[in-house]
Amino acid sequence: MPRGKPLQQNPPANRDNDAPLQSIKDEVTAIKVERIIRESADLFFRNGYTQTKMSDIADSLGATKPFVYNHFDSKSRILIEICERGTRDALEAAETAIEGKTSPSDKFEAFVRAFANAVLDDYKFVLIYFREELNIPPDSAEKITQMRKRINKILLDILSEGLKAGAFKINDPKLSALIITGMASYAFAWYRGDGRFGKDTIIAEIVSSSLKLVL
């Protein structure tokens, strides 16, 4: 029997080559999702959630409604992401800011600065949450409430620690925590990013005022 060339088997799939391709696809998807969220937030901010239609979002993107629905199955899902993100960003910023800090004063200043910065960066998201709270599904509303409680708990622990150490002069840590987070949170109501005072100036003033409340 004549010897021929051995039959070549199909080469195994190169998983190492597939991984970068999947990574690129994920990055592209993330960019698309981010654009939808940002454009939707602008429209909800200017026109209100109820008045904004999915077709308005698609038109603002220069895309089609199927493009938007491919990433979000409803307008409600977009609202949920916007509202959850505003709180999630603030929580993550607060947790990260106090890492490695030892004294209550350092933790407090880092917390207030990071929290205020997150609120100003996401002021449209925060405003939409407070304005459209009744349109948020109960399970998402509860998730946001729990994140807000965690933020407040971080500050409460810092204030309690400072009071015990004699570093802070406050009567009630719980009340002080509510006042301080409320002061920073409410900046969404008047901050627009292009006013007389820049973000850094506003944050510095919030930090300074907060320190005066506890020292």
Image (cartoon, rainbow, N blue to C red):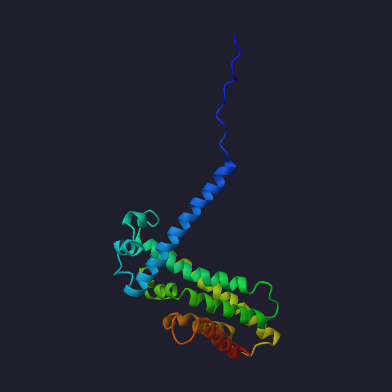
Q: How many marks?
A: 0
Relative placement, left or right, of 41 versus 24 is left
Relative placement, left or right, of 123 versus 91 is left
| Residue at 34% in and 74% down | 46
The x, y position of residue 5, in whole percent, is: 59, 19
> Closest to the observer: 175 or 168?
168
| Residue at 35% in and 71% down | 44
Does residue 137 appear in the picture of this structure?
A: no
Relative placement, left or right, of 68 versus 24 is left
Outermost residue on the top side: it is: 1
Does residue 33 appear in the picture of this structure?
A: yes
The x, y position of residue 42, in whole percent, is: 38, 71
| Quadrant of the image containing the C terminus | bottom right
> Closest to the observer: 203 or 96?
203
> Closest to the observer: 156 or 39?
39
| Residue at 53% in and 79% down | 116
| Quadrant of the image containing the N terminus | top right
The x, y position of residue 214, in whole percent, is: 61, 88
The x, y position of residue 168, in whole percent, is: 65, 88
Vertical arrangement, residue 6 with respect to residue 155, above or below: above
Relative placement, left or right, of 93 versus 197 is right
Q: Quadrant of residue 65?
A: bottom left
Vertical arrangement, residue 86 with respect to residue 168, above or below: above
